[in-house]
Amino acid sequence: MERFEFHNPTKIVYGTLEASKMGQWLNGVAKSCLLVMGKGSARKSGAFDRVAGSLKEYGIEFKVLEGVKSNPVLSKVEEGIEVVKRGHLESVLALGGGSVMDTAKAIAAGALMEGANIWDVFLGKAEIKAALPIFTCPTLAASGSEMNGYMVITNEETGHKLATGSIHVYPSVSVLDPELTVTVPKDYTAYGGVDAVCHLMEPYFNGPAKYTPVQDALAESLMKTIMNETMACLKDPSSLDHRGAMMWGATLALNGLTKAGVGEHHFPVHLIEHAISAIFDVPHGAGLGALLPGWMRFFATKRPERLRKFAIQVMGVHPHGSDEEVIQEGIITFSGWLEKIGTPSRLKDLGIGKDSLSDIAHNASFQASIWGMDGVYSGDVIHTVLTMAY
Ligand code: NZQ
Ligand code: ZN
């Protein structure tokens, strides 16, 4: 195991009907908030009524910013910063999926940045030194944004979808009420499962540390559980047991727990997927599903022992046989899961032409240079991965 510091300041409150008590967590912390939502699902599902009712009960004044789109954009963040400043709002509350939570985080930080633009943070040119208190009420099990300091925003002018992070944008309190997720349609239920599993895979495969039995055991069991619960939610969408298991699994998948101690590593599949979503506006989880089997075949040439372990421990492949046979069967079985839950398992499933691979590689190289990944993931290497995923 390598040296690590694990510090997660977010309080998680899990339970059915907990969204109707959201106001208690802002009470005494902030007298007002910006309530950020997407394009309508929170109103339609009744989630807005529950949360707004509770804010009123605790006398918390709120302004609504809605219309956040999937793959959220900088212009919406800037709109929200304006509303917060004009209304002297004291906190930001996200009621929605990862796109809404990330927008809320960027607004909370951007509202306190004098003389610099929040986009400078995504470019690695400025740092977040403080943020308004952030509260989240996730309505979709996927991103894990409810318990981490990451946020991903697309700059529509430059066409870049970039990720950044800061300790200041961890939510203070996130309320996980599984009832708010029963209306998630089948496609986004499946995309959420792929996203959560991929959050576990990135450190699991890419972490350099040689001996990580605790992290491996956690990641392997979470991957298996989330894969099973995704199928269970598709079969029984109104089950609070399965929806709740998916929520908690997705939250744990990217709250720092399984990556602590695996050593300095990157998120290559996310690096490339963000470029795909920036250019083609595909759902994040769909892009990941289309990339993963190809990336696994690429990565198996670098660290076969990790792919072998995944095949046996997670995909249940029989341990006898050469590395090649075991790894191949593991990737085929994983692709089978993607197909079973109805998500893309290769790039062509996204309707992307082979002539777009260079544009995607070029776009991804921009984030790679900011993340310091360009030594390993050069434009050519990214193009190779894309070709293997096609
Ligand atoms: O906009 P509305 O009407 O709310 O509809 C949304 C949207 O169309 C819908 N939805 C959400 N909750 C629903 C619902 N529909 C019915 N019932 C509900 N309860 O689902 C659609 C997708 O929502 P979105 O927020 O885009 O999905 P997700 O949660 O997967 O978030 C994706 C975003 O998260 C970022 C991705 O890059 C992407 O922009 N990520 C954030 C991370 C983080 N902060 O840690 C890490 C992730 O790797 C990811 O990159
Ligand atoms: Zn993700």
Image (cartoon, helix red, strand yellow):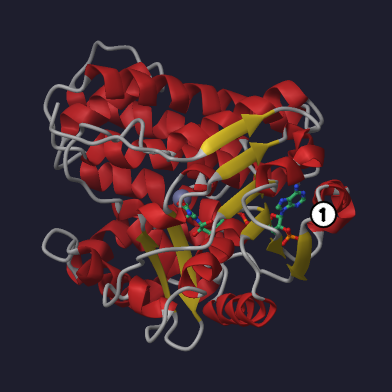
Image location of residue 141, percent across then percent down: 62, 41
How crowded is the residue under tag 1: few (<14 C-alpha within 10 Å), some, or many (20+)? some
Q: Is residue 177 above or below residue 370?
A: above
**Residue 97 location (% of width, % of height):** 64, 53
**Residue at the image position 72 percent from the left and 33 percent from the top:** 234
The residue nearer to you, when weighing 84 against 175, is 84
Looking at the picture, tell me which residue is in the foreground, 389 or 149: 149
Relative placement, left or right, of 231 versus 284 is: right
Residue 233, placed above or below residue 192: above
Q: Residue at x 18, y 20 (%)?
A: 322
What residue type is disc 1 on?
Gly
Give the labeled residue for mark 1.
59
Residue 98 vs 309, above or below: the answer is below
Left or right: residue 218 versus residue 344 is left
Q: Classify residue 375 by image quadrant.
A: bottom left
Q: Count of labels shown? A: 1
Q: Quadrant of the N terminus?
A: top left
Is 304 on the left or on the right of 40, as rendered? left
Q: Quadrant of ligand 1?
A: bottom right
